[in-house]
Image (cartoon, rainbow, N blue to C red):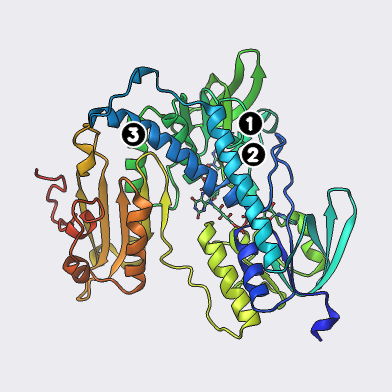
Amino acid sequence: IEEQYMYDLVVLGGGSGGLAAAKQAAELGARVAVFDYVTPSPKGTKWGLGGTCVNVGCIPKKLMHQAALLGEAVHEAAAFGWVIPDIKSVQINWEALSVAVQNHIKSVNWVTRVDLKNKKVEYINALGYFKDPHTIGGIMKNGEENVVTAKNILIAVGGRPKYPDIPGAIENGITSDDIFSLSQPPGKTLIVGAGYIGLECAGFLNGLGYNTTVMVRSIILRGFDQQMANIIAEEMEQRGVHFIYQAKPKLIKKEADGILVHWVDKLGQVQKDVYDTVLFAIGRRALTKDLKLENAGVICIPDDDKIDAVDEQTNVPHIYAVGDILHKKPELTPVAIHAGKLLSKRLFANSSETMDYTNIATTVFSPLEYGCVGLSEEQANIIYGEDNIEIYHAYYKPTEFFIPQKDNSHCYLKVVTLRNNDQKVIGMHFIGPNAGEVIQGFATAIKSNLTFPILKSTVGIHPTSAEELIRVFITKRSKMDPKPQS
Ligand code: FAD
Ligand code: NA7
């Protein structure tokens, strides 16, 4: 029956999830093709194979964050005895940074292509859509159509940044799709949106020396622990990021001296200012519209155009979905990759292992990073009730902060546990240097049913910031001061 189709698996979307599934399937002997096509951003930015993470997401973001951290480190180095001539004139060369970042990305694009070739996955550079439940058409750059048939189809087309529906937004604004390859320095920048992408972009732009403002519609980092989110924002404000709270943009207009922005403030008054760059980070839209899903009978959730799959299977049994396209699942690269690999193992190696979407650790790469795993304090309160959870918390002083006299007032962590006998750990939150590196191992511990007594019986590594998660002993309930005594 398989021979009736050209491929055992056709993947729509060559990003984190699609490529992982395709390579895994090919390694297991399946005949696989991947369609990947990047529609240029309204500003005209386009990129190569590999999807959001590699080209306009995690990777360039982390590199620019690193550039900002290095700028900070140059100044600290002087306190540690490095002789840095003319330190006041230390500044970023934006063009050099963006060229270095783009060169790295191009090398990853190349390696990705070679990898697909070696693994015998066919790469088709075309915008794919369903012609019928087993047939995919793909429009190539030259306008020609490439038509293939497949026994199984995986939808992994991800999403793209949204623009607000206000005059001038599309014409004069940019998004995360454009920022990492801007040929000119961004200058004075307004970032609309206070989700993690907005905060991260604001953090590195401010760190690189650009005047940066974040416009917040309601709260910071919706979905994250709000105490931690507000500490992150306070730290950013202290470092010079401006925040405009309870404000909504109304009009974006190009003028001789820059981009004029009108917004409505919390009192309903219209305010205005002029910026060099306006970046929208107001969430992402799922790319299901181009897929002609109706030709295959695949149903989307009308609210967000995403797909509600059960174990990555859509309502059509041989059509699957992974990654950012999934309804109410974390939009993270390792989530897409893990789900994609497991799916291919179920399809082509008789595996029965399914994806566990709980306890997935993540990190916000704000200037002082925030890593977390498990439940926020708010979620724990809702699920278990305030009387049934214990919050252990502490402020701490990273050793390396002392000599350069770096402000440590926002270095804070908390551990959320149940109050029953076991005292199971259900959430861990850490603000400080290298938060992602700190929290990753604790995520494994939580997956292995970490309890508070086990955490306390673990011997720390000194001197690190991670050991502070093990030293924690003050409960919020005790109302003791969580500030370090020394
Ligand atoms: P994508 O990687 O988006 O890949 C989908 C691919 O399909 C794209 O190449 C797209 O062009 C293509 N495509 C779309 N429609 C079609 C079609 N009809 N035919 C053919 N091809 C099509 N995650 C983390 O884990 N850590 C981070 O630090 C992090 N930082 C981020 C920073 C930013 C600025 C952004 C935007 C995202 C970040 N993410 C991060 C999220 C991460 O990038 C995504 O979760 C991940 O890329 C999703 O993978 P995916 O396979 O679902 O889709
Ligand atoms: P998020 O996390 O969805 O955050 C979007 C932010 O933008 C959030 O602060 C929103 O405020 C705000 N927003 C949304 N619409 C508007 C409009 N129209 N005007 C002003 N502000 C707005 O998106 P990101 O871009 O950070 O990240 C995209 C995804 O990647 C996200 O889902 C992550 O899981 C990964 P709100 O809180 O809704 O008032």
Q: CA distance from mark 2 to mark 3?
A: 35 Å
Of residues 320 and 91, the one nearer the viewer is 91
Amino acid carrying mark 3 in the image? Ala
Could you tell me if residue 236 is visible in this image?
Answer: yes
Q: Which of the two marks, 1 or 3, is nearer to us in this view?
A: 3
Seen in the image, is 397 located left or right of residue 210?
left
Amino acid carrying mark 1 in the image? Gly
Q: Residue at x 54, y 61 (%)?
A: 328
Seen in the image, is 292 located left or right of residue 160?
right
The residue under label 2 is 163
The residue under label 1 is 173
Count every numbered label the image shows and give the total: 3
Mark drawn on residue 73? 3
SS category of the residue bearing label 2: loop
Q: Which of the two marks, 2 or 1, is nearer to us in this view?
A: 1
User: Which residue is most to the top?
Assistant: 256
Of residues 282 and 127, the one nearer the viewer is 127
Q: Quadrant of residue 95?
A: top right
In the rendered view, tell whether residue 252 sits above or below residue 193.
above
Q: Residues within 10 Å of mark 2 (few under 14, many from 20)?
A: some
Q: Are marks 2 and 1 in contact (CB under 8 Å)?
A: yes
Q: CA distance from mark 2 to mark 1?
A: 8 Å
